[in-house]
Amino acid sequence: MNRGEILYSGKAKSVFLTEDPDKLLLEFRNDTSAFDGEKVEQLARKGMVNNRFNAFIMGHLERQGVSTHFDALCGDNESLVKRLDMIPVECVVRNMATGSLCRRLGIEDGVDLDPPVFEFFLKNDQLHDPMINEYHIDSFGWATAEEVGEMKRQTFEVNKILKALFLDSGMLLIDFKLEFGRCDGKLMLGDEFTPDGCRIWDKETRKKLDKDRFRQGLGSVVEAYEEVAHRLGLDLSSPAIGESD
Ligand code: ADP
Ligand code: UDP
């Protein structure tokens, strides 16, 4: 699928139109950002690793019955996806306390959250992605009550599936962020699932294997992403073109 006009250039991905009006090309770039785009660096191989990682996770979710926008890998850094009408809300699930939850509520880092905590944030960098609730979403018309229920249901379902996947390879899924959109009136998982948007710790050592390595200046960021990929059995060296997941 050929790249058409650029539709949107985000902090880590660029979105291109294609000859099919219902499909977009997502380009995963090496740009890595934190603190609402205040800290930005280029990390070699990150775009390729995240593109493959995302394809692997989306494929796994599809096989477990979750509808996603993912269609096919189109090269090292690009994937073809269904064009969604994105809902401007981030869905976060937390299995263990860390990050903004600890800062906001004074909870000790690493405490188990059982049942897991669900949070909505507004996708708005200028406002620093403020936390919102279902009433804001309803009142401002960002999504219907039915869509809110579906986003929560599907995010918890993704948590169940992926917690087990990571645990099978000796890793803890600490928290993650999902974005959803609409396609033909149906809610569908969009955007990405990569170590840029989740937290993964080694089960035994609690070594951080996600973007906190970049946020906290711990180094070996892409190496950690590659370690997660290898532990999940993902071969990052095989050709991407023509693969379907
Ligand atoms: P950000 O916008 O946070 O800087 P990215 O750099 O990841 O994030 O940019 C990707 C953009 O593409 C995001 O705004 C995301 O909501 C949007 N997007 C992801 N998947 C789709 C899709 N299937 N259809 C339309 N837009 C999408
Ligand atoms: N997250 C994300 N994009 C955002 C905000 C958060 O992908 O704009 C992810 C983040 O990587 C983590 C989870 O959502 O896995 C919860 O993030 P948190 O609220 O703790 O934010 P942070 O500590 O990064 O400010």
Image (spheres, grey):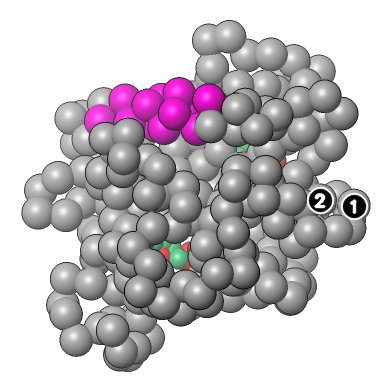
**For mark 1, what is the residue?**
218
Above or below, 1 against 192 in this view is below
The furthest residue to the top:
114
Indicate whether residue 5 is drawn in magenta.
no
Q: Residue at x 90, y 52 (%)?
A: 218
Judged from the image, the secondary structure of the residue bearing numbered disc 2 is helix
Foreground of the two, 36 or 59? 59
Mark 2 or mark 1, earlier in chain:
2
Percent position of residue 165, x then y? 53, 32
Q: Is there CB contact under 8 Å for labels 2 and 1?
A: yes
- Image quadrant occupied by the N terminus: bottom left
Percent x, y of residue 84: 24, 60
Residue 5 in which image quadrant:
bottom left
Number of other residues with Cα within 10 Å of mark 2, as a class: few under 14, some 14 to 19, many 20 or more: some
Q: Is 152 left or right of 184, judged from the image as shown?
A: right
**3D distance between C-alphas at marks 2 and 1:** 5 Å
In the rendered structure, find residue 213 and report the number of the disc placed on it. 2
In this view of the protein, can residue 238 be seen by the observer? yes
- Total marks shown come to 2
Q: Quadrant of residue 90?
A: top left
Q: Is residue 102 visible?
A: no
Residue at figure coordinates x 82%, y 24% from the top left? 204
Q: Is residue 144 above or below residue 236?
A: above
Judged from this view, the residue extending furthest toward the right is 218
Q: Amino acid at mark 1?
A: Leu
Residues rendered magenta in the picture: 150-164
State the residue at coordinates (82%, 30%). Answer: 206
Please provide percent x and percent y for residue 233.
Answer: 59, 47
Q: Amino acid at mark 2?
A: Arg
Mark 1 closeness class: few <14, some 14–19, many ≥20 residues within 10 Å: few
